[in-house]
Amino acid sequence: MKKLLSPVTLILALLLVSCGAKGPTTDINLILGDFQFTPAEFVVPAGQEISFTAVNNGAVVHNFVVMKLGTDAGSVFEDEDQSNVYWEVELVPGADVTTSFTAPDQPGEYQVVCRTEGHIASGMVGKLIVVAGEN
C-alpha cells in the first residue's frame, strides 16, 4: 500500500530543498547600481569559462573588478592596485554587456570592487568565491 505525502510533509521537503546552499555556477548575472552590486557574492568553479552579463542601472560609470587572490584594494582603488587586477569590465550609465572570462584556477575568495572614485568606501564591494571542480 502506497502512502501519499501529507501537504505539511511536502511543504517541509520543499523548504529544505530551497534552503540548501547553491553550488557553483558558470553564469554571473549582475546589476550595478549606485554603490552596490546585486548580487554581491558569486560562487564559480575553478578554471571554468564564466558567462558574464551585467547592466549598469546607476547614474555614473561602474566597474566590476576582480582582484587577484590575496590582494585587497583597501578603501580606495589606486594606480598601484591595477597590477593586482585579475579581470575587469567597465560600464557607462545605462549600458549592458554580455562577455566571458576564465575563472581563476586557484580556489579561494577574491575581492570584487568598483574602482570608480569613492565607491569602495561607500560599500561597492563583493566577493567571487572560486571552488575546486569535481573530479
Image (spheres, grey):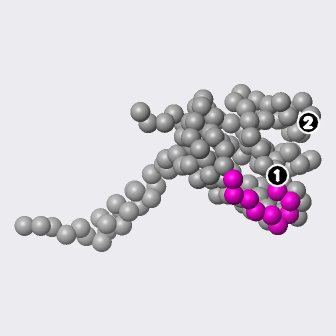
Q: Counting other residues with Cα less than 10 Å from the Cα at mark 1, is it few (<14), some (14-19), or many (20 or more)?
A: some
Residue type at mark 2 is: Glu
**Residue indicated by mark 1:** 90
**Residue indicated by mark 2:** 78
Q: Is residue 17 magenta?
A: no
Task: State the separation of the CA atoms marked 1 and 2.
Answer: 16 Å
Where disc 2 sits, the SS reads loop
Answer with the quarter of the image where residue 18 lies: bottom left
Residue type at mark 1 is: Glu
Q: Is residue 47 above or below residue 25?
A: above
- The residue drawn where x is 50% and y is 50% is 22
Does residue 31 show up? yes
Q: Quadrant of the N terminus?
A: bottom left
Where disc 1 sits, the SS reads strand
Q: Position of residue 79 (x, y in %)?
A: 92, 34
Query: From this viewpoint, which residue is outermost toward the bottom?
Result: 7
- The residue drawn where x is 68% and y is 36% is 110
